[in-house]
Image (cartoon, grey):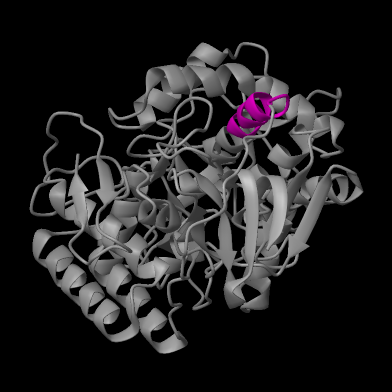
Amino acid sequence: MKSASILIVGAGLAGLFLALKLAPRRCVVLSQAPLGQASSSAWAQGGLAAALAPGDDPKLHADDTVAAGAGLVDPAVASLIAREGPDRVRDLISLGVPFDRTPDGALAQSLEAAHSRPRVVRVSGDLAGKAIMDALIAAARAAPHIEIVERKRARALLRDANGRVCGVLCDNEEAFLASDVILATGGAGGLYAVTTNPTEAQGQGFAMAARVGALIADPEFVQFHPTAIDIGRDPAPLATEALRGEGAHVINGKGEAFVADLAPRDVVARAIHLERQAGRGAFLDAREAVGSKFPAHFPTVFAACMSAGLDPREAPIPIAPAAHYHMGGVATDIWGRTSVEGLWAVGECASTGAHGANRLASNSLLEAVVFAHRIAARLRDDAAEHALAPGPATAPPTLADEPRADLRRIMEAHANVVRDGAGLERALADVHALGESHGQANALVAAHLILSAALARTESRGAHYRSDYPDVATPQRTFVTWRGVSGTPNAAAAS
């Protein structure tokens, strides 16, 4: 066993920013892959939303966040992230992130869907995630208080005799102990056959937390990005929303517009899904809006298209909705604490109340850095808890390639942009069967929590659309627990 005062599980934006903010308190960061790989943060194209421009205001940003969240955003949390966002952007600038500038030296800010003002800072058009991660990785490797341990995949949380989380169990039964454990494990897009996320992102963080009794919030709300590039790749490359902010249009195969380009993501994703189902196809036409500027202004999108033999300067880009961001996760308070002592959560694996039923574009990176800063502020000067010895624990099984592919097909077929009760019941039965055959892997726990909460929500709200319940009901968040020792297939229950 290895011991640390603070253990951060995950090395994306949230985990590394938190580690840096903890200085001078020592911490260990576990990364399941070499830094910068298998992290959704590095793939973020649009950037980070913050009210920095003249004429903008954090209150306007908070209002937009609440409006996009379809009645489930916590207004206090929306206000908090909007208020603290500008300072966190300045932190990133001080770490060397080269955000785009206007000719007069001001930060360039783009408009994205459901924002009332241009407020998304970006890098080279669509390279924000990579640039931010490059800066954080360099700073973290140079920081004497941070120990980075790569190629270590956490599979279970350890608890002491008092029930306090005191470490994690990794592959090969290797244990890391700590007085405080922070989950920064990312999202759940890899549960779906079509996703913009690394396929490794299978909801492991909130599944591990659920197994030790942590409260899980809003797992049914999975955001599907409307404009993944449909060229048959896994994961699917992304056509950033900033393209539509620049004036690109969504059209069908006949060249007809069928949805407002800057409508909220759930609206655009459903419209594209239905247009594709009707056989008319869906495309993003940026020929006039971007045209010859593509290579310089959106190099990531341009390279993805060209690698598939498609020149976006001359032809519309084929698009499809793809699992993109999980708005649910481990329920936390405004300081990132979960319902289990010793356990914190930050970033996409957490549910803070910031995103509601439909995350506002580019608020994910914002929430990650704001809450990472807040967790660090609580832990930085605290005396370490005296950790007791962990109780016995066994890591759950992992899914082999074939059952994992089966799971992704099940989720794609029945828990997608449009859902219905019969499909969700079929998916739950299929997930149960996979568990019976292959053991209760974390991915199956995560899938079960998403499916059972989606079945229980008999309304349509934000990213959760039930064709058998198309109307909205009274706004109410979902809170679930995973009951029983190690979990059972029917253990998720609304609270």
- In the rendered image, residue 141, in percent from the top left (x then y), is placed at 87, 51
Q: Is residue 414 left or right of residue 237?
A: left
In depth, the one of 470 and 3 nearer the eye is: 3
| Residue at the image position 55 percent from the left and 40 percent from the top | 346
Above or below for 138 versus 53: below
- In the rendered image, residue 52, in percent from the top left (x then y), is placed at 67, 19
- In the rendered image, residue 317, in percent from the top left (x then y), is placed at 52, 64
Magenta residue check for 375: yes
Q: Is residue 468 left or right of residue 18?
A: left
- In the rendered image, residue 480, in percent from the top left (x then y), is placed at 26, 45
Above or below for 104 versus 200: above
Q: Looking at the image, can residue 127 be seen? A: no
Above or below for 256 versus 413: above
Q: Is residue 356 left or right of residue 202?
A: left
**Quadrant containing the C terminus in the rendered view:** top left
Question: Which picture quadrant has residue 65?
Answer: top left
Residue reaching furthest bottom? Answer: 402
| Residue at the image position 85 percent from the left and 36 percent from the top | 95
Q: Point out the stretch of residues depicted in magenta.
A: 371-382
Above or below for 68 versus 189: above
Q: Looking at the image, can residue 109 be seen? A: yes
Q: Main secondary structure of the magenta part?
A: helix
In depth, the one of 386 and 143 nearer the eye is: 386
Magenta residue check for 301: no
**Quadrant containing the N terminus in the rendered view:** bottom right
Q: Is residue 493 left or right of residue 90?
A: left
| Residue at the image position 67 percent from the left and 30 percent from the top | 376
